[in-house]
Image (tube, grey):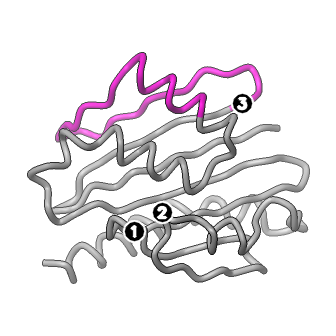
Amino acid sequence: MLKNCILYFLLVFGLSLSGLSCAAKNCVFSDDTISEKSFSDNKSVALYQLFPKKNEVKGVLSNGNLFSVKYWSCNHYGKHSFMIIGPEMQTIPDELNSQVIFLGGVSLSEAELNLLVKAIERKPLKLSNLPIKLNISSDGFNEFYIQIGIAGEAIFVEIKLYKG
């Protein structure tokens, strides 16, 4: 069961980041967007591995969920975080909003996290068989959204923001 969830994670995660690698291929990443200290000091992160050349962190959160965070800063600024929840689906519908905020706390700045929290307070996320997307309105970002989907026994949560 867990093996299936990990396979789903790898498949969906690989597909979700394939577009990012093309867009950022020629970028020189800014060192100030990601630091090992922000993950080593974060109590929400149980295990992580930093990939400095890719400006990416992958690991396990303290709640047992797998996560990945990718930052880029070149001509544009952006963040893409991804989490897999499962296979314990029974309690997830009641915890979905707090799980999304949990991922935001690991990957977003304080100001970005505040925007995310306010958007969820205005329109709480409800798990559905169909993928759901919540766009977060902000003059500071060209794109800022939360996307959630179910694959097998796992739930995938994606937070993406982009500023041109």
Counting every numbered tag in the picture gives 3
For mark 3, does the 10 Å Cα neighbourhood hold few (<14), some (14 to 19), or many (20 or more) residues? few
Q: Are marks 2 and 1 in contact (CB under 8 Å)?
A: yes
Tell me the residue that label 2 is attached to.
44
Residue 88 position, x and y percent, is: 14, 62
- Residue at (72, 30) in percent of width and height: 142
Q: Earlier in the sequence, mark 2 or mark 1?
A: 2
The magenta segment: 114-142
Question: Label 3 vs label 1: CA separation?
Answer: 31 Å
Question: Label 2 vs label 1: CA separation?
Answer: 5 Å
Whether the magenta-drawn stretch holds residue 11 is answered as no
Residue 162 position, x and y percent, is: 71, 41
Whether the magenta-drawn stretch holds residue 136 is answered as yes
Tell me the residue that label 1 is attached to.
62
- Residue at (45, 75) in percent of width and height: 46
Tell me the residue that label 3 is attached to.
142
Q: Is residue 137 left or right of residue 22?
A: left
Residue 41 found in image quarter = bottom right
Q: Amino acid at mark 2?
A: Ser
- Residue at (60, 34) in percent of width and height: 144
- Residue at (88, 63) in percent of width and height: 30
Which type of secondary structure does the marked residue at label 3 adopt? loop
Q: Amino acid at mark 3?
A: Asn
Residue 42 position, x and y percent, is: 58, 65
Residue 151 found in image quarter = bottom left
Above or below, 130 against 157 in this view is above
Above or below, 148 against 107 in this view is above
